Amino acid sequence: MSNGLLGIEKLDRAEIEAYLNRAKFFQTHGEGQFKKLDTLRGKTLVNLFFENSTRTRTSFEIAAKRLGADTISISSSGSSVSKGESLVDTLNTLAAMRPHAIVMRHAASGAPHFLARHLSMPIINAGDGMHEHPTQALLDALTILDHRPMLEGLRVAIIGDIIHSRVARSNIYLLSKFGAEVVLCGPAPMLPPELAKLAPGVTITHDIREAIGGAHVIMMLRVQLERQHETPFPTGDYFRFHGLRLEHLSLAQPDAIVMHPGPINRGREISSEVADSRHSVILNQVENGVAIRMAVLEKVMGA
Amino acid sequence: MSTLLIKNGRVMDPASKLDTITDIAITDGKIVAIDKGIESFGNTEVFDATGRIVAPGFIDMHVHLREPGFEHSETIETGGRAAAAGGFTSVCCMPNTNPVNDSAVVTTYIIERARRASPVHVFPIGAITKGSAGEELASIGAMKQAGIVAISDDGRPVMNARVMRRAMESARAFGLPVINHCEDLNLSAGGDMHEGFESIKLGLRGIPACSEDVMVARDILLAEVTCARYHVAHISARHSVEMVKFAKMRGLPVTSEVCPHHFTLCDSDIAPYDSNFKMKPPLRSCFDVAAVTEGLVNGAIDVIATDHAPHPGSEKMQEFERCPFGITGLETAIGLSLEQLVHTGRISLMRMIEMYTIEPNRVLNLGKGRIEVGGAADITIFDTGREWAFDLNKSQSKSRNSPFDGRVFKGGQVATIVTGRIVWRLES
């Protein structure tokens, strides 16, 4: 069993705080003129992306390079996966070249957990299906903490296609561990009631106004068409009932922040006015992604 | 003249209500005497069954032998050996082979292969529809003449109610029961495990219990219209159990079976993303497990069957959602039944034996399932106290997909006798 990072669910507060504190250091380190570190010099990281990704893959690559590691990125098209090789065989082949860690994104929930049982090398989960996306939850926490002294007592509304969202699950676990109140909101077929039992302090509503009422943080999620076998909600009605518009923001706390893991679909789950408003911290999230991934890579690959 | 003498066993035969310590003499594949103190003579082989249960040969009415077409998973020979090692003397194999057993030719092939290669009796189950595609009825009458004992499109349930109705009408005319794997494929589409808190947590798509319930409901209504004998395969959901009970109360010829894994494990017992816990129907909630167990006790469920479904490691060693459904089950069935049902006092030992013998025989009319003088000597010998651990690597099956590797059991199979011949015995 490897000492990678597979999910937030099993982490305790101290482990999460350690990542966040280290990331805060990397946030300020360099200040624009980023100085390359040599913490991971001579170490090799493989970025293995079986699913499309722009920001996460680039973010891991930049984080690794800033720490001095060598990185190799592989995407499923153009790899032996498209020649019918099984996941275990692909990973065993890569493991034989002895990289120091593998960052993996995969469309199947549990794919990294399954591999971690069969490989000794650390695996960092960069998103597995509908399950977890731990570095996203960490960078989201870091972004909230840029605006608030602590997570405890905050009201966080997570709005959108929750059932298909790994970002939602990881955020629910993390926020709940730190005593935040989490309100989930979305169309009924994307929001089964069992989601409220994932962690303490989680409630469910189908009314976006109720969800946003008094919220300190509004997290919008993309509708994950690629994970749906059906159209569970009329496409045309989505924005009308669950899209975030400027008028909603008056219901939230005056200094509420609006987050989105990206990629955003303007006019679908979020209006352009909100995405570009002073409440939006979407680009800060992207920036913080590098700092968080540096902290994770340093912990997993260092020493 | 070959002779076998089983000495001092506790002979339990549900059909005759016999439960006594006695001896059984077997000559030329037939039971010739059941009496205390039978003396051995000449070259008689003596099997000392002291402290053991001697029961009619167990019948597993739901297995997948994978031949023809999927011999990399199992063959009639290896599946037959696994059955023998599990204490079964007869198995009924489902038609989802390649080609599908939807014609007399394939039925005959299976019967001939089994005659030569299998240590246990093999009774084929024919497909309901051609290619199990759910559209056009298979040659049910011709398959019946060739030797099928039931029809089923196991794994690919007939979704069209009209086709199912016609199948039931035909089956009734040919004197065959209809067995259905109850799953509304629209409700379960894309699902990998039971829909509930656990599937939500793991981010896996759900197979809702209602996907089973709606088809059980439909079929019971159709069975009433057609007067067909109808059997629910591997029942797992609580409302389905209730509906079967209701059908029986109405006097309909409806029966059901349950698999040992469905009364042993629930969805929260799944080792995350381990495909050895992936099967259809899926491991349900603890409430369903309780309801299924209750159904075993109150008679809603008649039969225990394994749904032995071998898959090679190459197919089960994948991302959970890519792995095929099914686990092996022949060699752990008796151990799990004793553990969950008998040792807990939920059912008597005699009732457990019934559910493996006269009950499946009642569904299928195999002419098996009892110990009687003049009858074929198919006998299962097991015990109820010996501690043993299931070692998956020693399984007789060609495949290794079981969640019960290393599980310690109290009691299990000791010897399997088919037509007077010991086809498997515990290594001493």
Image: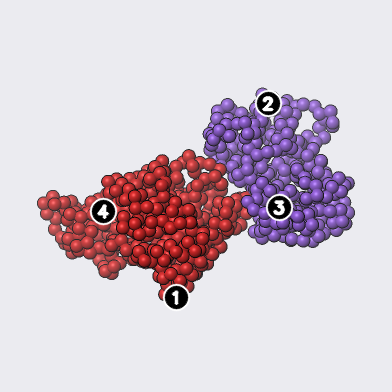
Chain colours: A purple, B red
Horizontal side of residue B96 vs B160, given as left or right: left
Disc 2 on helix, strand or loop?
strand
Disc 3 on helix, strand or loop?
loop
Q: CA distance from mark 3 to mark 2?
A: 36 Å
Residue B395, placed above or below residue A119: below
| Residue that protrudes farthest toward the left in the picture | B42
Return the mark for residue B418.
4
Residue at image location 67% in from the left, 58% down from the top: A189
Disc 4 on helix, strand or loop?
strand
Disc 1 on helix, strand or loop?
loop
**Residue position marked by numbered label 2 in the rendering:** A70
Q: CA distance from mark 3 to mark 1?
A: 45 Å
Nearest to the eye among marks 3 and 2: give it: 3
Residue B372, placed above or below residue A229: below
Q: CA distance from mark 4 to mark 1?
A: 38 Å
Closest to the observer, B178 or B396? B178
User: Residue B18 at what x, y percent from top left?
Assistant: 26, 68
Nearest to the eye among marks 2 and 4: give it: 4
**Residue position marked by numbered label 1 in the rendering:** B250
The picture quadrant where one finds residue A99 is: top right
Q: Given the image, on which type of amino acid does mark 1 rest?
A: Arg
Dot 3 or dot 2: first in sequence order is 2
Residue B413 appears in the rendering: no
User: Residue A69 at what x, y percent from top left?
Assistant: 69, 27
Q: CA distance from mark 1 to mark 2?
A: 72 Å
